[in-house]
Amino acid sequence: MTMADRSALKFVGFIFATVTLAVMLAGGMIVKGYADGAYTLDGAAQVSR
């Protein structure tokens, strides 16, 4: 029975963890920007016309 190389699996896991952390950090920064009022939704401006 053949098994996967553990060092390669650790490397792939590290890559996935890094990407996950980057996406979570970017999402948190966007949410914080909306909460602080730095960003606004364009849909709200179109409704008020």
Image (cartoon, rainbow, N blue to C red):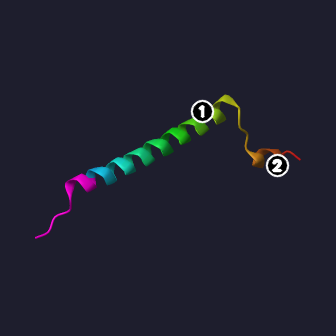
Quarter occupied by residue 29:
top right
Q: Residue furthest top?
A: 36
| Residue 32: mark | 1
Picture coordinates of residue 25, whole percent (x, y): 50, 38
| Residue 2 at x, y percent in the picture | 14, 69
Mark 2: amino acid:
Val
Question: 24 or 47: nearer the eye?
Answer: 24
**First in sequence: mark 2 vs mark 1:** 1
Instruction: Please rate how many residues cluster around mark 1, counting C-alpha atoms within 10 Å: few if below 14, some from 14 to 19, many from 20.
Output: few
Quadrant containing the N terminus in the rendered view: bottom left
Is 45 in front, or is 23? 23
Considering only vertical position in the picture, is 46 above or below 40? below
Position of residue 41 measured from the top left corner of the image (x, y, whole percent) = 73, 44
Against 32, residue 24 (above or below) is below
- Mark closer to the observer (2, 1): 1
For the residues marked 2 and 1, what is the alpha-carbon distance in whole angstroms?
24 Å
Between 10 and 29, the residue placed more toward the observer is 10
Residue drawn at x 50%, y 45% as measured from the top left: 23
Question: What range is drawn magenta here?
Answer: 1-9
Q: Is residue 28 magenta?
A: no
Q: Is residue 41 left or right of residue 17?
A: right
Q: Quadrant of residue 35?
A: top right
Q: Residue at x 70, y 31 (%)?
A: 37
Q: Report the residue at 73% width, 39% height from top.
A: 40
Q: Secondary structure at mark 2?
A: helix
How would you rate the neighbour count of disc 2 (Cα within 10 Å): few for under 14, some for 14-19, many for 20 or more?
few
Q: Residue furthest bottom?
A: 1
Magenta span includes 5: yes
Residue wearing tag 2: 47
Q: Does residue 15 appear to the left or right of 47 in the view shown?
A: left
Please name the amino acid that badge 1 sits on: Lys
